[in-house]
Amino acid sequence: MSLIKSISGIRGTIGGKVGEGLSAVDVVRFTASYASFIKESYNGDSNTIVVGRDARISGKMVENLVVGTLMSMGFDVINIGKASTPTTELAVVGEKACGGIIITASHNPVQWNALKLLNHNGEFLSDAEGKEVIRRAENDAYSFAEVFSLGNTYNNETWANRHIEMVKALALVDTDAISKCNFTVAVDGINSVGGEIIPMLLRSLGVNNIIEINCESTGNFAHTPEPIPQNLTEISDVMRKTGADVGFVVDPDVDRLAIVMENGEMFVEENTLVAIADYVLSHTPGSTVSNLSSSRGLRDVTRSHGCEYSAAAVGEVNVVTKMKEVCAIIGGEGNGGIIYPELHYGRDALVGVALFLTLMAKSGKKVSEIKAGLPHYEIAKNKIELTPDIDVDKILEAVKLHFADEEVNDIDGVKIDFADSWVHLRKSNTEPIIRIYSEAATMAEADKLADSIKQIIISLK
């Protein structure tokens, strides 16, 4: 059983002993700690917290615990039910709430669930704020409301449609152009909320030919939910057989977008942000941001438009902080996460779908032709499983010293930049692993670089 407390929220496998997995007691404890933190730190007039969840099997159970705990802490709850992460973020702002909780373990398998914690701006808590919530939970530093001060709960299932209308209203989304192209679009919704909201969005954009794959939001994931090539063989086969123009795949909470080309091959999730940023920059020049583990492609296209690129530590909250600092017009992460401040500061697959379809419509290009026009890099994503006896900090410091003559960035793990490639090592926020990302001109070169790093780590273990 696993329970991980990090900048990405409180994440764990369902069941088990208290403190070893995400048990019912742990859900209540961390929800109460969050509510206590909001009560003391929020300076506005609202007493309302928004709750949304993905379609996981454990989702309804965790939702009941979260909603009941928030009420027991004296908060009113607006429960938007099954909803994407970006939808819940927008609902916090739209409802003028003092915070929000998203019940989702994102790309993790079905055994997992999590509490993603939002502030009144619909954005994730900072690292310091998250640590304060954890401190309160570890010390049971919260107090429940008395009977006449208990909160109420209200259901509001309008936010999916409201989210779609907000996406359609973006200046760079052209519904007329999309509709005229009569695209055929395949969608893999991984049996979660994306299976409902992405087809809804497509129909609203004027797409009438939709091939729905795994779009029943049962929570019984048809394949491993992370939207990476080895998990997407079904939609690849569908693309080749049907001649669809484009395929879209999302993770269970719809904040990541993977794209499949008309020939059934992967567009590659690293290119999702690069292609959409290229389109945005061609109309509204400005700075961009991605994290240290993302492709150099964003840097290259940003500079090709005469604009400035910046890198941030891994984690959505870190990317958002950097985006605000440099007033970026678009940013995100190489895992297919698009952050477009014109709508909100959160990864949003709906924004990605609408902007990418507009790019296709206005350029008249096939998806494979769009990819051919982007900077060409190959990125290898490897990992090493962690055991309790491994000293990660010692390993990272040793790697840093080994490459002391190269350009080294240690704001988040260790990243070594070479002239034509890079490698980034960091401890995951969401899993007990060390991630090793490497990028070069070819996959063979990227794999070779990753293998050399693995050998160094093995020699240190």
Image (tube, grey):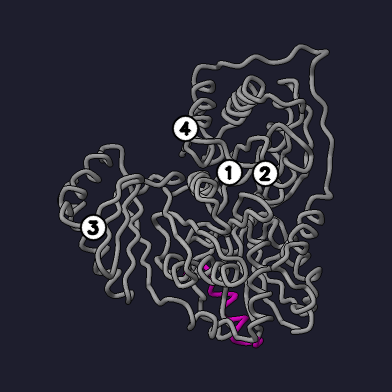
Foreground: disc 1 or disc 4: 1
Q: Residue at x 20, y 57 (%)?
A: 406
Dot 3: element: helix
Foreground: disc 2 or disc 3: 3
* Res 113 label: 1
Q: Residue at x 28, y 42 (%)?
A: 392
Q: Which residues are magenta?
A: 230-243
Outermost front residue: 306
Q: Residue at x 77, y 32 (%)?
A: 77
Frontmost residue, 179 versus 193? 179
Q: Earlier in the sequence, mark 4 or mark 3?
A: 4
Task: Read off the residue under disc 4.
Answer: 20
User: What's the distance in space between the residues labelled 2 and 4, CA to CA?
Assistant: 19 Å
- Disc 3 marks a residue whose amino acid type is Lys
Q: Earlier in the sequence, mark 2 or mark 3?
A: 2
Frontmost residue, 265 versus 117? 117
Determine crowd level at label 4: few under 14, some 14-19, many 20+ residues with C-alpha closer than 10 A: some
Mark 2 near mark 3, Cβ–Cβ under 8 Å? no
Vertical comparison of 215 with 429: above or below: below
Percent of width and height locating residue 321: 51, 44
* Res 454 label: 3
